[in-house]
Image (cartoon, rainbow, N blue to C red):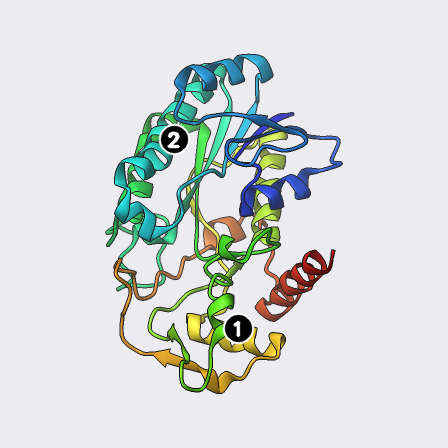
Amino acid sequence: MRVALIGASGLLGRAVADALAGDPKFLVTGTAHTRPGPGRVPLDLTDAAAIASFFDAYRPQAVVLAAAERRPDVCEQFPEQAHALNVGAVERIAHAAREHGAWLLSISTDYVFDGSRAPYRPDAPPHPLNAYGHGKLAGERALTPSLDNACVLRLPLLYGPLEQVGESAATSFIPALEAARADRPAVVDDWAIRYPTFTPDVAVVIRQLLERVAAGRPVTGIHHWSGNEAMTKYAIALELAARLGLDPAHIRAQSTPADTTPRPYDCHLDSASLEALGIGRRTPFAQGLDAVLDELRIRKSA
């Protein structure tokens, strides 16, 4: 089956590419825009003509749309730029997928909810608090005409093998932790509950969804996948400090919301609809974090 992996250079896209590599069931064509590389086709998702040409050339039977502007602060500061990727690109990809009869998987977020009534089932009423959540919800709704042959997969905070620490909110504060001192501690959020989810696990979920498409049993509609360990960023910071040999006394918990961009309190996603299909894998956070940091050390020493 021919698979187009849109956003193959990103944190999740790389994990999906790795999960599908070498599997004879899938002929994967990855795309990238700002980070092209070997085996990735350049594609500007704001260019409808380029998208149409890509689909005509590669004729995918399934499409995984993993490209997005995922940074809430950037979405607040640059709404037009974020809308072009989180809404406009979804509309264009969905249109091309319909034209070619391709099944489409679009990645969304737990931030479509306000965090006041967790856990959230896929049919729970959305109520986003920030521009990122509003944009991703609009992207979901852009798929409405396609949902008979498309799937929305909502995900929470992702972490996984990195090219740089800023790729994941679970690791982006490592430089602040390393720079912290007794008289200048790193202040880390200890209010919002998050469920860090390992990208190689999500890649397994996506591979299993693609296997069902290949078998003529596609999953459609809205579904959730999430890790099941509740953590604040402060708790994650303590885990990082222990592994990086940093003094936890130099890390201070912020117990009230302090972000400029509003974040939801607890958006735990109920994953039962996929679990009922036998889909999913969960790596314990400590094990996943060890793997991420081990790879970072190898990259730094190379």
Seen in the image, is 11 located left or right of residue 72?
A: right
Residue under the image location 53 percent in, 12 percent down: 56
Name the foreground residue: 13 vs 299: 299
Residue 176 at what x, y percent from top left? 46, 70
Q: Which image quarter holds the C terminus?
A: bottom right
Q: Is residue 58 left or right of residue 171?
A: right
Tell me how far mark 1 sits from mark 2, CA to CA: 38 Å
Circle 1: residue type: Glu
- For marks 1 and 2, the one nearer the N-term is 2
On screen, 73 above or below 175? Answer: above
> Up-down: is 258 above or below 57?
below
Which quadrant, please, contains the N terminus? top right
Residue depicted at x 50% and y 27%:
103
Q: Position of residue 115 (x, y in %)?
A: 29, 62
Counting from the top left corner in percent of width and height, residue 72 is at: 33, 52
As drawn, the label of residue 178 is 1
Residue 208 seen by the camera? no
Residues tagged 1 and 2 counted as in contact (Cβ below 8 A)? no
**On the image, numbered disc 2 is attached to which residue?**
90
Q: Which kind of residue does numbered mark 2 sit on?
A: Val
